[in-house]
Amino acid sequence: MSFPKNFIWGTATASFQIEGAWDEDGKSPSNWDEFCEQPDAISDHSNGRIACDHYHRFREDVALMAAHGIRNYRFSVSWPRILPEGTGKVNEAGVDFYNRLIDCLLENGIRPWMTIYHWDMPACLEKKGGWVSEQMPDWFAEYTGVLADRFGDRVKDFFTINEPQCIIGLGYMTGGFAPGLKLGLKEQVTACHNLLKSHGRACQVLREKVKDVRIGYAPCGGVVIPKDENNPADVEAARKAYFTVEKSSPAFSVAWFSDPVVLGKYPEDGLKYFGQYLPEGWQEDLKLICQKLDFYAQNIYEGREVRAAENEDGYETVPYPAGHPRTACGWPVTPRALYWGPRYLWERYQVPFLISENGMSSHDCVMLDGKVHDPHRIDYLHRYIREFRRAGEDGVDIRGYFCWSLMDNFEWARGYSERFGLVYVDYPTGRRIPKDSLAWYAETVRTNGENL
């Protein structure tokens, strides 16, 4: 079996990571602009003020996609560029930028996939409590309404929120991401719940305002892979481990963030640990949170192996052997994550499935011949995408795959020290150099994966 006939092949980016122009044309500071100013928050002491300068060079970036046959582009909108005060007055210059980007995509035959929130919140709203504030669902609905009104005539595909686990787990629990807080369990659970309500409100607004809209959600979470996939006990153990809510916090859980959205209920084990911290009336909120999705997406990069065990959990993690391959940022290379993640998620949620991010950081450089050769990335993508195809062959309703990322960019707390792109960015000059992997991916897109 090959990929479905209308399979969606695309690339993805996020506004803060590529746009730059951090204080131009009426944009206000974001929580990430302010986080970058905290001492040692970013490993290479950089910031997103210029990034890839996509704000000024987007036509060049769209042309690169078009030249390589990429027909789907997932990008996010900078909330403080649209609503500098978080709510209220719309910044027309910000709207104009995205109008020009969307029109340029369409002129080049590229379908726009808009992510409403990929982590850059107006700093003024973060100061009012951010996701911990009970006003957040209203703020988020207003912001979504502006996007629907201004762009919904041309954009029909929306992701509400990218990686809620990272937003709460890294932003409000470990403090490693903006806004850099280490909150107690009650505030963490409140933030999770407000985020889920915001997702629900966004879905309602989009359904009301955008004709023929298609809505998705893009959470994350390390996949759990059965050590021996021919052993039913290991397969069941991995399934259980994947959806178990950890006792320490729900912030990184798959089930805590997706069960309410798709199934309309919080997972029972999570409620046992954290139900006491949910706000009054949370049961009623589940009707708002659980809105119809047209596609369920997941960002998947890696996973861990488990096997069945005779302990309290019923499973145990099997460490990877010494010397197991890793990407430049230290993540294990585990292609089977793109089989077992989609399979388990499809079995549980039964919503058409997309990979919204997958890719690798590699030690890329411009070589003596002036080109960027990245055979490790090609091999990585080849292995992972083949496993995703296998998931489709085994009955998962796979609809699309977005490679992370179109180009090297500001990799959050790691700054510019990691390169995930299919296009190399020389930051001092802004020069774009297509890597070998872009040509390989273009061929994969052209043949609908037959080259695999």
Image (cartoon, rainbow, N blue to C red):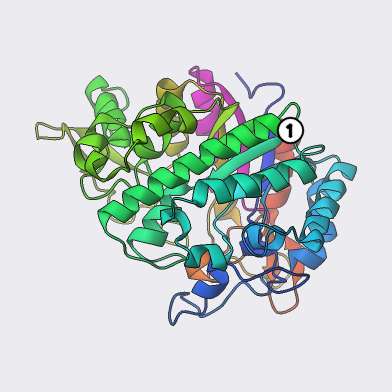
Dividing the picture into quadrants, the one containing residue 168 is: bottom left
Give the residue at the far left of this rendering: 311
Residue 115 at least partly seen: no
> Is 397 situated above or below 82?
above
Dividing the picture into quadrants, the one containing residue 227 is: top left
- Residue 206: image x %, image y %? 66, 35
> Is 337 situated above or below 302?
above
**Residue visible at 53% across and 67% down?**
31
Under mark 1, the amino acid is: Val
**Residue visible at 58% across and 58% down?**
420
- Describe the element under mark 1 as helix, strand or loop: loop
Label total for image: 1
Q: Is residue 380 magenta?
A: yes
> Is 4 situated above or below 316?
above
Q: Which residues are magenta?
A: 379-406
Q: Quadrant of the C terminus?
A: top right
- Residue 65: image x %, image y %? 78, 49
Q: Is residue 156 magenta?
A: no
Front-most of 296 and 143? Answer: 143
The answer to whether residue 244 is left or right of residue 119 is left
Read off the residue under disc 1: 210
**Residue visible at 85% across and 39% down?**
109
> Is 44 situated above or below 259?
below
Q: Quadrant of the N terminus?
A: top right
Residue 295 at least partly seen: yes
The answer to whether residue 204 is left or right of residue 147 is left
